């Protein structure tokens, strides 16, 4: 992880992701920019109790830690994401592992300096509520998944954005199966007319 002082890039990300609109008075908050190398565990380096991080570039993986100590993939993506929202609300240590699956750039807010500002900001708190709710939805969907791989695959696709599986490798990690097993299931679902292939590694459920 390294801190970068490129003001132009930071301002570009703030504008591109509309981050300033998430606060009533963004001028009261200072954003710092950090870059993480592929494979780094982000929340081992920057504790979510102390930092709120907005991922603005790159791919992250979010894992849940099972009781056995093994990891279960909850989500993988390169969409704009906030890290530390659940910890901000609960004041508790993170229950998740967040890995940089590529080079990742984040904009961070030092909560030791600005927590008192954020706790009184209704615009930010409304955003935080939506973000925490989405994380809860992911965890709930994972807990309710059926045991059968075919049914898990259907359930997974029903709960993805636009009912679309994007990336067989990521999906096989999430579903805890091999890529070959998942491809066999997807081929079977295609033959049955339940899903259709819309691109390389991309499958969509038919309405």
Image (cartoon, rainbow, N blue to C red):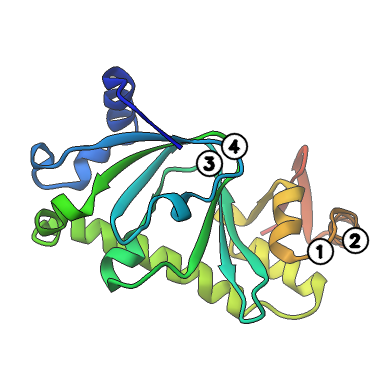
Of 123 and 90, the residue lying toward us: 90
Mark 4 is surrounded, within 10 Å at the Cα level, by few (under 14), some (14 to 19) or many (20 or more) other residues, namely some
N-term-proximal mark, 3 vs 1: 3
**Numbered disc in front, either 3 or 4:** 4
Q: Residue at x 14, y 42 (%)?
A: 29
Looking at this rendering, what residue extends furthest in the top direction? 8
Q: For mark 4, give the secondary structure.
A: loop
The residue that disc 1 covers is: 177
The residue that disc 4 covers is: 102
Task: Please tell me the numbered disc located at residue 78.
Answer: 3
- Label 2 close to label 4 by CB (< 8 Å): no
N-term-proximal mark, 1 vs 4: 4
Q: For mark 2, give the secondary structure.
A: helix
Please give left or right for residue 87 compared with residue 44 in the image. Answer: left
The residue that disc 2 covers is: 188
Distance of label 1 from label 4 (alpha carbons)? 22 Å
N-term-proximal mark, 2 vs 4: 4
How many numbered discs, if any?
A: 4
**Numbered disc in front, either 2 or 1:** 1
């Amino acid at each position: 992880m390294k801190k970068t002082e490129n003001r132009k890039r930071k301002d570009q990300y703030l504008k591109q992701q509309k981050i300033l609109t998430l606060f009533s008075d963004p001028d009261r908050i200072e954003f710092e920019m950090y870059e993480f190398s592929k494979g780094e565990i982000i929340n081992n380096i920057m504790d979510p109790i102390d930092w709120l991080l907005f991922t603005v570039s790159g791919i992250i993986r979010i894992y849940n830690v099972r009781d056995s100590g093994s990891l279960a993939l909850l989500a993988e993506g390169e969409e704009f994401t906030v890290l530390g929202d659940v910890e901000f609300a609960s004041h508790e240590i993170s229950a998740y592992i967040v890995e940089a699956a590529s080079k990742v750039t984040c904009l961070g807010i030092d909560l030791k300096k600005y927590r008192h500002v954020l706790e009184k900001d209704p615009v930010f708190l409304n955003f935080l509520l939506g973000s925490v709710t989405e994380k809860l939805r992911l965890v709930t969907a994972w807990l309710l998944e059926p045991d059968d791989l075919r049914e898990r695959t259907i359930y997974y696709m029903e709960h993805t954005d636009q009912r679309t599986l994007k990336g067989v490798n990521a999906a096989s990690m999430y579903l805890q199966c091999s890529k070959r097993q998942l491809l066999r299931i997807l081929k079977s679902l295609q033959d049955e007319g339940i899903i259709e292939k819309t691109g390389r590694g991309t499958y969509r459920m038919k309405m």
